[in-house]
Image (tube, helix red, strand yellow):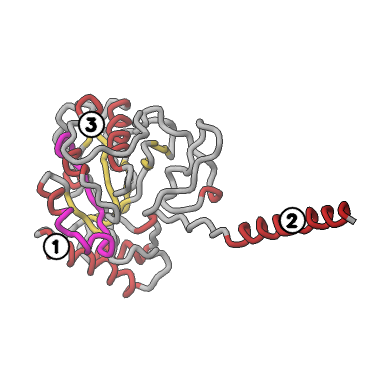
Amino acid sequence: MLIPRLRARRIAAAVLAVATLAGCAASKPDHPKWTDTAAPPPAVASSAVAASPASSEAAPPSASPAAKPSKTQATTTAAAPPAGVNYGDRLPKFDRAPKADKVHLPEGNLAAYYSRIPTDQPVAFITIDDGQVKRPEALDLIKQAGVPVTLFLMIDAIRNDPQYFKRLQDAGAVIEAHTVTHQSLRGKSYNVQRKEICDSADKLGNWYGRRPVLFRPPYGEKDDTTLKASHDCGMHAAFFWKETVDKGIVRYQQGNTVQRGDIILMHFRDRFVDDFIAALQAIKAAGLTPALLEDYIP
């Protein structure tokens, strides 16, 4: 009788182990939804393929074909250093940007819309969105780089610490509008879109002493109503992008280099240092100079 009893105990233990594993699998949380203000899911296994294309700010990786990562991505993968660090050789040196050739804005009651500034000058534009993640080292990095940047700030992301961005403004960054709540505007009513755009510009003007004149629609999604509301809210132009930067990797919509007039999109994220330096390196590798977007829009 000893052998049958031992066998029965082993069978019971095996059944309990299977049930435990099944319970763990059932309780595993779903992957969090990927938004444009959070890091995307991990890249696919091949190191030669990036996790998302430059054409999408927030679409899941399966929505579009993969894009090639930049060869000019930042070399470090370590956590960003604390404020007060000298970034030294990691920052490329640039010639002074040429005097801007102003863009001729189209007439009418719609704001102009650009993903690339129509210019033959050897320049590109760094734009930084949202504002949820406020890394202390961003201020030192922007000061040391000495290049112009445009910040498209979302009110709900920055209202807990508007002074953080005032320090960036004092270092030379220019602050523009990116809605109050970061909802997709395309397909929404005129009143909804106008409120998101006008209210954000008004609030930023009160906080920073200059009311924005440029606008970026969340996720780059817009329609004619967006451009009409932008115009009516005093925006001279609205913007998409040609390259994106995340986790130190530059992704391109066209080719594998930054082109003249390209607008580069990055965000205030945990890897801000790597992203910013990768953008600078990509501009340098293309033989271009960072320029200020506002200098080109009358």
Give the residue type that dot 2 points to.
Answer: Ala
- The residue to which callout 1 is attached is 205
> Which quadrant of the structure image shows residue 216?
bottom left
Q: Does residue 145 show up magenta in the picture?
A: yes
> Which quadrant of the structure image shows residue 273?
top left
> Which quadrant of the structure image shows residue 1?
bottom right
Depth check: give the residue in front, 268 or 204: 268
Give the image location of residue 257, x and y in percent: 38, 30
Using a 10 Å C-alpha cutoff, classify the residue at mark 3 as few (fewer than 14 neighbours), some (14 to 19) or many (20 or more): many
Give the image location of residue 166, x and y in percent: 13, 54
Using a 10 Å C-alpha cutoff, classify the residue at mark 1 as few (fewer than 14 neighbours), some (14 to 19) or many (20 or more): some
- CA gap between label 2 and label 3 equals 68 Å
Depth check: give the residue in front, 89 or 80: 80
Give the residue type that dot 1 points to.
Answer: Gly
Q: Residue at x 71, y 56 (%)?
A: 18
- CA gap between label 1 and label 3 equals 29 Å
Q: Which residues are magenta?
A: 143-165
Give the image location of residue 129, x and y in percent: 29, 52
- The residue to which callout 2 is attached is 13
Q: Residue at x 62, y 57 (%)?
A: 25
Using a 10 Å C-alpha cutoff, classify the residue at mark 2 as few (fewer than 14 neighbours), some (14 to 19) or many (20 or more): few
Q: Earlier in the sequence, mark 2 or mark 3?
A: 2
Residue 132 seen in the current view: yes
For label 2, the SS is helix
- CA gap between label 2 and label 1 equals 68 Å
Residue 34 located left or right of residue 298:
right
Give the image location of residue 9, x and y in percent: 79, 56
For label 1, the SS is helix
Q: Earlier in the sequence, mark 1 or mark 3?
A: 1
